Amino acid sequence: MSQKVALITGAARGIGLATSKLMLNRGWKVAMLDRDSEELALASNGLEGAIPFVCDVSVPEQVQETVPALLTAFGRLDAVVNNAGVAEFGPIEETDFAGWRRVMETNLDGVFLVSQATISALKETRGSIVNIGSISGLRASTLRVAYGTSKAAVIQLTKQQAAELGEFGVRSNCVCPGPVRTKLAMAVHSAEIVDAYHDAIPLNRYGSEMEIAEVIAFLCSDQASYVTGQVIASDGGFDSTGIGLPALRK
């Protein structure tokens, strides 16, 4: 029962799956949550120390059922990684309220619901929360009115959590990934988009899922025991460059 346990949402693919595997490799046990039951079963198959839980974090009743179940299974909880997220892109005037709510329900409501449901367990272990924001929550961009706003709200929610939970030894931090070389991104990003990102990012490349997972794992660990209320952009320097013209850098 002394082995540390992490709850990771959106764990069936991408950054969530990479983080799950990294934490397992570092001796943690992992509760892998995702609403895609088939993909979750495939992702968790053969991962020793991991238990999958089908849960839509935007549905309060499912969160309220899942958290006690994973606490019964593991007996403790030391870290919560709120990674589950959705993205719908489009112009402001063409974004209907239903689409706005779909994004907010998962990206913001889900973070609130899972965090709130796990606070008591985290107080017992003096654990940590790591919320996954986005570069889109730090700097505005076209077509991201719902997505960017939801991630900016997650950043503020992180600071609220840090301010209120610090006296109980519970830390809360936010990781904001920049462009990441996921299967989805590579499928929808044209060569022109890739080149534009490379021009705007000082490191001149996309990040990898594992590079983001490394930052998350650090914030969950005892090595970050005095780090809370922080927003860390794991973005190759993208946020630091502002709106500088690529042509002026040549």
Image (spheres, rainbow, N blue to C red):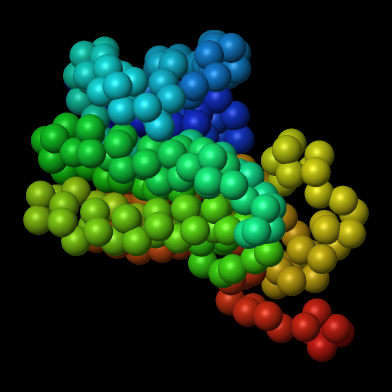
Q: Residue at x 70, y 41 (%)?
A: 182
Q: How many marks?
A: 0
| Left or right: 87 as drawn, with respect to 44 | right
> Which residue in the rendered view is the most extreme toward the bottom?
248
40 lies above or below 111: above
Image height check: is 112 above or below 8?
below
Q: Name the image quarter holding residue 231.
A: bottom left
Tell me the residue at 59%/29% (across/down). Answer: 13
Q: Along the line of sight, which residue is nearer the eye, 189 or 100?
A: 100
Quarter that holds the C terminus: bottom right
- Residue 107 at what x, y percent from top left? 46, 43
Q: Residue at x 70, y 72 (%)?
A: 202
Q: Answer yes or no: is residue 213 visible.
A: no
Q: Is residue 50 left or right of residue 161?
A: right
Compared to 109, does 146 lie above or below?
Answer: below
Residue at image point 80% right, 43% down? 188
Where does the N terminus fall, quadrant-wise? Answer: top left
Q: Position of residue 121 (x, y in %)?
A: 17, 32
| Residue 142 in view of the camera | yes
Q: Position of residue 103 (x, y in %)?
A: 52, 43
Query: Where is residue 143 drawn, in percent x and y?
Result: 68, 58
Task: Looking at the picture, tell me which residue is in the foreground, 89 or 18.
Answer: 89
